[in-house]
Amino acid sequence: MKELFPVKQVMGFVFSLVLTVVALLVYFTDMSFPIGMTILLVTAFIQAGLQLVVFMHAGETDDKKSIYTNVYYGLIIALVTIFGTLLILVWDM
Amino acid sequence: MDFFDRFAVPHPSFLIYASMVGIGLTMVAIVLGITYFKKWGYLWREWITTVDHKRIGIMYLLVALLMLFRGGVDAIMMRYQLSMPDNKFLESQHYNEVFTTHGVVMILFMAMPFITFFFNYLIPLQIGARDVAFPRLNALSFWLFFMGMGLFNISFIVGGSPDAGWTSYFPLANNEFSPSVGTNYYMIAIQIAGMGTLISGINFITTILKMRAPGMKLMKMPMFTWSAFIANVIVVFAFPVLTVLLAMGTMDRLFGTNFFTTGDGGMDMLWANLFWVWGHPEVYILILPAFGLYSEIISTFARRNLYGYKSMVASMVVISVFSFLVWTHHFFTMGQGAFTNSIFSITTMAIAIPTGVKIFNWLFTLWKGKIVFTTPMLYSMLFIPLFTLGGVTGVMLAMSAADYQYHNTMFLVAHFHNVIIPGVVYAMIAGLTFYWPKMFGFMLNERIGKWTAWIMSVGFVLAFIPMYITGLDGQARRMYTYSESTGFSMLNMVAFIGAGIMAISFALLVYNIYYSIRYASRDIGSDPWDARSLEWATHTPVPEYNFAITPQVASTQGFWDAKKNGHELFKGKYEKIHMPNNSGWPFILGCIFFVFGFAMVFSIWPLAIVTLIGILVCLVYRSFEKDHGRYISVEEIEETEAKLRGVKNEDR
């Protein structure tokens, strides 16, 4: 019975609900813009990672290596694009 | 009649009316011709519904050649307009439309389908697969691309062409400054074609990762497949930016949002920024497969294995990352500070290093090789010096301080034509000549081919080197005329003559195809160039299942080692082969997308809603469709193989 019960998935589901509630707090409580934005960004990235690993089974096949390489590559490019754009249009304009 | 007024061309001229008549007559002639020769059924069964990667590839090739003609005509018109001061051939509006069309057509509807043709035709053959990973999606990619291309191409006779440049910068591209529907065409046609490209990108990555023949490790793939893999990874990461960008631009133009407005919290510069976040990687999407083709051709005709395989792969991986780190060099003059410009200057110069590694690898492959000067090899040899010239001027442009002098001048125009023509166009023609016998069973004439290469190069040098000079003297790009006192006229006349010579070389290419169809020998076997990789190991013409027995590979050049070093490629005996069924679904979905795009361009909302529902119905239908493909029996394989002379066993 123990190996049939998907502990990891249930825990993951609970954790993703917690993350959603934390993100919702930004809307329902009165906090400053930087703090709210930080909470949203952090919970969003953890949430995305959780979905990818626990529910989309990213690390469970032989393709583990290529999947993670792709994810890291995409992450790097997304961050470079965002921070590059901020640099060009906001910080150094 | 109000409803139909919107389809009128806002700035008509004799040339446009003549084109309308020409296009109308051609369409009628094509329809009548197909009906007269009773080819509708053949066309539907063998081509429109096909999911065979080879046939889809050939359709991409046809579109690319057609668009090369269209973009080339635009180029000649521009060069003629600029050949004399105060020329009255084109008025300014018409000139704007022509250079916009030239840019979009050449990059998105000529170069992109040309490389996609090579992806489609070669990747499955080079890795020993029977087809791509998702054959039905592959057909959908083609038809989406085709319909986007069609939509863009009718713009100049229905409603007016886009006129804001191929970069379509805001605020110029907004409703106030570009009131005609032209820029709507730009947004929506490229969106539809771009979806096709994105889908193929995913398809080819999956194909290369999952469908390689047994024994072909990643580091044993042929160099073209490696370059295609990297290019498609860039496609998958860069094209979503374009998709989002075009969607935002469409919403600004059609629904009054404020993404790129100058007031109300919008930021017009964001368009230029995001455009080049896609646009710069796009350049490498075009050039990397071209590099891959040169690698194949140079190692085949130097009769040596490629020098520095690992460094070739490493340099491409580095280029793929760096291609996302340099986009600001397209707008050094936009107003950001010296700190930002310095960062992007340095990353831009750094990208010359992996490119230089590749150039030296080709030179070292030639070193001590037994070089055979065939037409594809001649193009590759012309490519190295001409492309290096373009690369060096690229480094000049990369210096942000100096760029203030070069920005938006003919110097820039000369630079990017200098990398794209010897880099991409030469590779495409060299690759076409190289793989022509594989596709059609006869070779293109070598003598005419070499003349073509030389004439094209002479034309190229005459057309583009003068632009460097006039650019440094201050001739701005996209100016439709200039006065005699500027002193640009002589060099521009030289450039026009060069463009004319290039046109002659393309005519010669077409003549070569005609000549070779009539006179070339059909008895050339399946390996006329004495080549090295797997695509040459199967028959010519390639049977629909590609390889009767799945090849087993042990080296980077499987076929060469099978010929010279006694490796055995085809072990075992025939087994039944699982193949996908043909389907009309991709074509029908493409057609609905075309009508949807048209309705969006002209804001005909009822039609847009109906077609959008049609698209959803098609997707739902596909989700519930059960199609398990079909099997080709062993008897059928034996029959086909015997008809193709069963050369496989005799060859060993």
Image (cartoon, rainbow, N blue to C red):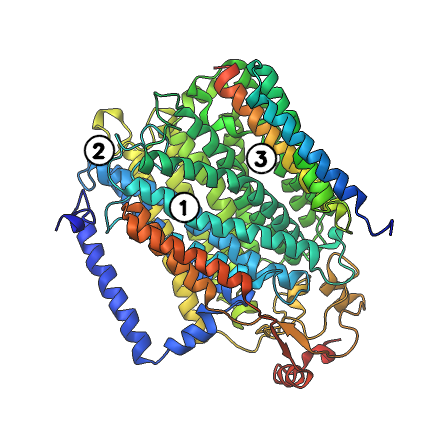
Which residue is label 1 attached to? B190
Q: CA distance from mark 1 to mark 2?
A: 34 Å
Asked if disc 1 and disc 2 are in contact, CB closer than 8 Å, the reply is no
- Mark yes or no: residue B578 visible: yes
Label 2 crowd (10 A; few <14 / some 14-19 / many >=20): many
Residue B528 lies in what quarter of the image? Answer: bottom right
Quadrant showing the C terminus of chain B: bottom right
Q: Are marks 2 and 3 on the same chain?
A: yes
- Tell us which disc is closer to us: 1 or 2: 1
Q: Are marks 3 and 1 on the same chain?
A: yes
* SS at badge 2: loop
Q: Earlier in the sequence, mark 2 or mark 3?
A: 2
Where residue B85 is drawn, which disc sits there? 2
Residue B542 % position (x, y): 59, 72
Question: Nearer the N terminus, badge 1 or badge 2?
Answer: 2
- Callout 3: 10 Å neighbours few (<14), some, many (20+)? many
Instruction: Decide if residue B73 is in sight here.
Output: no
Residue for badge 3: B323
- The answer for which chain carries disc 2 is B
Q: Position of residue B92 (x, y in %)?
A: 22, 35
Per the image, label 3 sits on a secondary structure element best described as loop
